[in-house]
Image (tube, rainbow, N blue to C red):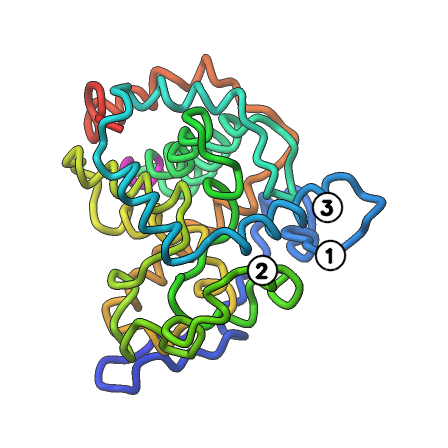
Amino acid sequence: MRLLEKGTKVGVIDPSELLRPEPAFAAKPVGDFRDFSIDENDPIKERVRKLYIKMHTGQTVDFVKSRHDKWLKFDKFEAGVLEVLEKLNDLVDESDPDVDLPNIYHGFQTAERIRADHPDLEWFQLTGLIHDIGKVMFFYGEPQWAVLGDTFPVGCEWGPSIVYRDTSFHDNPDGKNPLYNTKYGMYSPNCGLDNLMMSWGHDEYLYQVLKHNKTTLPDEALSMIRFHSFYPWHASGDYTHLCNESDNEKLKWVLEFNKYDLYSKSEKVPDIEELTPYYQSLIDKYLPGKLKW
């Protein structure tokens, strides 16, 4: 993969260079992951497609602003990390074509794959465990389309690689608004990812929760959490015209994280009871006590 060199034109990344090698631990061929093909006779594929239509209709600038107003007061509840993670035992991600298990298992699968390859990076392992716990919003009234799935910036032209892009945005009013439907929309060239308003979901929410609660997880972890669902950028090279040079470092870490987030998915269920004491020790180090959500 070629990252941008300092002093070169920002935003020039060949999407073909973002392809990942097939990891040995993948439960199936890489090409079989993230299969968003349309098959009306496949109930999971239809479930996924219908959720994305709702998402791409509802994720507007005004909607995202309303979610910021609602959720970023951090006044909904207080709970420790494991308490929130356990809630995901009752959530099956309807945007995911690869697994049909409660979401808590995915957190432990991701963390354990990272732990196997990076035994000395405790913060990375913990990031794998918690990266999806922003999905707790679902249990407080948010529909899955405003919690799950791939993310993208609102307020500008939709990237060409967004899943179902050509068939799912027809009823989104931002597409008819000249302030939002151009290449740069409400942004400026190379403004940087940190200055984009992303579609609302668990990535942005958890990032903001961690910042508010003053986590000691490093910036690399926060970038992984904030952008791990931004597939149009990190998997296809869309939106590079909005990136700046500091986003190179984010891309490296997000891609490294994505290898475990995506390819660790399988029907093999981890022993959560056995693993919990180890991960509680990491929580106590980086995210102790009860957090404000």
Looking at the image, tell me whether mark 2 or mark 3 is earlier in sequence order: 3
Label 2 to label 3: alpha-carbon separation: 21 Å
Residue at point 19%, 23% (across, down) = 288
Which amino acid does the dot numbered 2 rest on? Asp
**In the image shown, does 69 or 7 lie closer to the viewer?**
69
- Is the residue under label 3 in contact with that under label 2 (CB below 8 Å)? no
Mark 2 vs mark 3: give the one in front.
2
Q: Which residue is mark 2?
A: 171
Secondary structure beneath dot 3 equals helix
96 left or right of 175 in image: right
Instruction: Characterize the magenta stretch by its predominant secondary structure.
Output: helix
Label 2 to label 1: alpha-carbon separation: 21 Å
Residue 45 is tagged as: 3
- Label 3, residues with CA under 10 Å away: few <14, some 14-19, many ≥20: many
29 left or right of 41 in image: left
Which amino acid does the dot numbered 1 rest on? Ser
Is residue 287 in view?
A: yes
Q: Which residue is mark 1?
A: 37
Residue at point 40%, 75% (across, down) = 2
